[in-house]
Image (cartoon, rainbow, N blue to C red):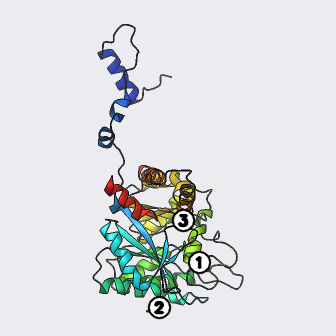
Amino acid sequence: MKRKCPPYIYSGCILQRGMSREKGGPSVYARYRRLRRTPALRRLVSETRLDASGLIYPVFVTERETEPTKVASMPGVMRWPVAEVVGVAGKCEEAGIGAILLFGIPSQKDAEGSQASAEDGVIQRALRELRSCGYSGVVITDVCLCEYTDHGHCGLLDDAGMVLNDPTLRRLADTAVSHVRAGADMVAPSAMMDGMVGAIREALDGAGFAHVPILSYSVKYASAFYGPFRDAADGAPRFGDRRSHQMNPANGREAMLEHEADIIEGADILMVKPGLAYLDVVRRTREEFPNHPLAVYNVSGEYSMVKAAAANGWIDERAVVLETLTGFRRAGADLILTYHALDVARWLRDG
Ligand SMILES: [Zn+2]
């Protein structure tokens, strides 16, 4: 069977026929290095571009500390008291970062995670603070119960310690509505409960918030890369793990089902989390759902590994981070949630 010549070979053939070469010269016609010669040429033909406006900066808001507190496992990341959030948000807006994503660390926890949806909860207070200061940047809130439950799981539990799906939906919906009421521009449910986006959509619509979009953590894997985050957000489960609701890292096809379900339920933006070990899933999502904005979460473990290696002088932090984020964009992500956002914005601006 005759194989069809791929287009790039074909154009090479045309070139070869049309060009005369010096006798004895090298028979190299396609010189891809021509466009790599100078920084300006490389920039001109760059297929992928990074821009601060596509970055989302996660911000930890704490009720347990009164001073900004370092997160030991994530150098450069802080837990901010409510009063400091306006300052951090302002810095992000000034740097041109697209949005901030708030995570709450409450002073009290219980079995139902009641502080997640409380009027005076830590996130609700931070949102009111931002709004009363006239903050106009995009504020997204994480919607889950794991930082608010005393057992550290993402939902309500049965007697055997299993996360209950449907009873948890109500709690997530109440939390989302309370965030929007306090001033959130967008909610980002991360609990990986079946039907979570639909329940939140219905509740938001019912409360008069049909205009508020949902960024769904549609594909969230049960990943070992979340370790440092649990330190930052104080949300580690007291027993067991999250494999009964988060996805098995071995599965790629199933991820497409998760996206599809969330789209049907009304998700406005899709997400793949984590990023580096799941670039194939990002690419596949881009191909199968080309018309939805797609976010990727460059998670805490990915961040801390780079920080640790850089602190040891083993890698060039700036180069590695920019290469990684470019990789996410090349794979098909529109938006990148990353703890590097402020640094990246500065590097992009300073060139
Ligand atoms: Zn959770």
Residue to which mark 1 is pinned: 235
Disc number for residue 300: 3
Asked if disc 1 is less than 8 Å from ligand 1, the answer is yes
Q: Residue at label 2?
A: 118
Q: Position of residue 119 (x, y in %)?
A: 43, 92
User: In the picture shown, does residue 70 fall above or below 39?
Assistant: below
Where is residue 297? Give x, y as percent: 48, 63
Vertical placement of residue 53 versus 176, above or below: above
In the image, which is nearer the foreground, mark 1 or mark 2? 1
Work out whether 270 lies above or below 69.
above
* Marks 3/1: CA–CA distance: 13 Å
What percent of the width, then of the height, locates residue 73? 58, 68
> Is residue 248 visible in this depiction of the protein?
yes
Q: Amino acid at mark 3?
A: Ser
* Mark 1 and mark 2: Cα distance apart in space: 18 Å
Residue type for callout 2: Ala
Instruction: Residue 285: give x, y in percent of width and height.
Output: 46, 55
Of the pair 283 and 164, the residue shown nearer to us: 283
Q: Is residue 351 left or right of residue 165?
A: left
Q: In the image as oriented, which residue stretches furthest toward the right?
A: 160
